[in-house]
Amino acid sequence: MSSSHSMAPGPLLPWVPKTLVTARESKVTKSNPTTRAPSRTAPWSTGHSRAPNSKHMGILMDDATLKFYDVIPGALISLCIWHYDGWTELVLAAVEGDPSKMSCLGISEDTFYRTANSQHFKGEQWRQWTAQRAFVALYISAHRGHVDAVQYLLGLGANCLAKSPLGRTPLHVVAAMGRTDCVQPLLEHGASIHDRDLKSDTPITIARRLKRGHLERKMFLLYWMIKSGSRDPDLVARKALEKSSPGVETRRSTILIS
């Protein structure tokens, strides 16, 4: 399952498939007209509105954008997951943030879960299949802000450094959606504030552009605290700024990371 979304300011349409996209998450804005469509490997269909009070059904193809489909600002989009390879159940469990459901849906190598497609997989092919499912579940959970599910998936070995086709990591989507509680577990498992997507955006620059100053500072300080092993945020901030570009406020650091 692989696709992605634009990180322009405004509400974002995540690349992960969902049976229902809420108005807040699917609203198209003038500043975000080029939301990326899903890949064929993450099949879903969409009913989208090109004009008020009109409905159109279609399939979003690889690398297409909402602008390409003439979706106007203010339109609402409903995504439908295709019933293929068990994705529907996994996506719903991740949207709910339910680890007990996800654990039974093929997110680890030792799972007994099989689909008509995966029952023939062995070795590296099986590892890639389960790893992809774990990453998608992690990405959705991070997008929704389900910190318990994020911690569970990271503990199972879900790769927080994996990327969507446009280079977005779970930390990118956390920054975009303002999911502050999910920052620390991702950073503790190796996520980087410096990872760039194909547009050269990092989680830090996304948070800055969306005016999430508290989240930006928290990511910056926690990243360097974990990297240095220090528990003194003021000391960490001073040293980190010697190595990083300016622009991140560090005064009263002990308060900013709370």
Image (tube, rainbow, N blue to C red):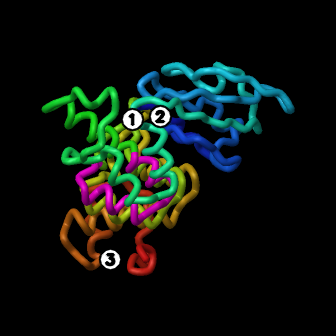
Write down the quadrant of residue 52 in the picture: top right
Magenta residues, dominant SS class: helix
Q: Position of residue 256 (x, y in %)?
A: 45, 74
Residue 243 circle label? none
Left or right, 168 with respect to 234, comes to: right
Query: What residue is shown with label 2?
Result: 4
Task: Decide which of tag 2 and tag 3 comes sooner along the chain.
Answer: 2
Write down the quadrant of residue 219 in the picture: bottom left
Name the residue type under label 2: Ser
Is disc 2 in contact with disc 1, using a CB cutoff of under 8 Å?
yes
Q: Residue at x 43, y 79 (%)?
A: 252
Camera-side residue of 228 and 148: 148
Q: Position of residue 127 (x, y in %)?
A: 20, 37
Q: State how far apart marks 2 and 1 are (Cα).
A: 6 Å
Q: Position of residue 69 (x, y in %)?
A: 67, 20
Task: Decide which of tag 3 and tag 1 comes sooner along the chain.
Answer: 1
Q: Within 10 Å of the Cα at label 3, are there few (<14), some (14-19), or many (20+) other Cα atoms?
A: some
Disc 1 on helix, strand or loop?
A: loop
Residue 234 circle label? 3
Write down the quadrant of residue 45 in the picture: top right
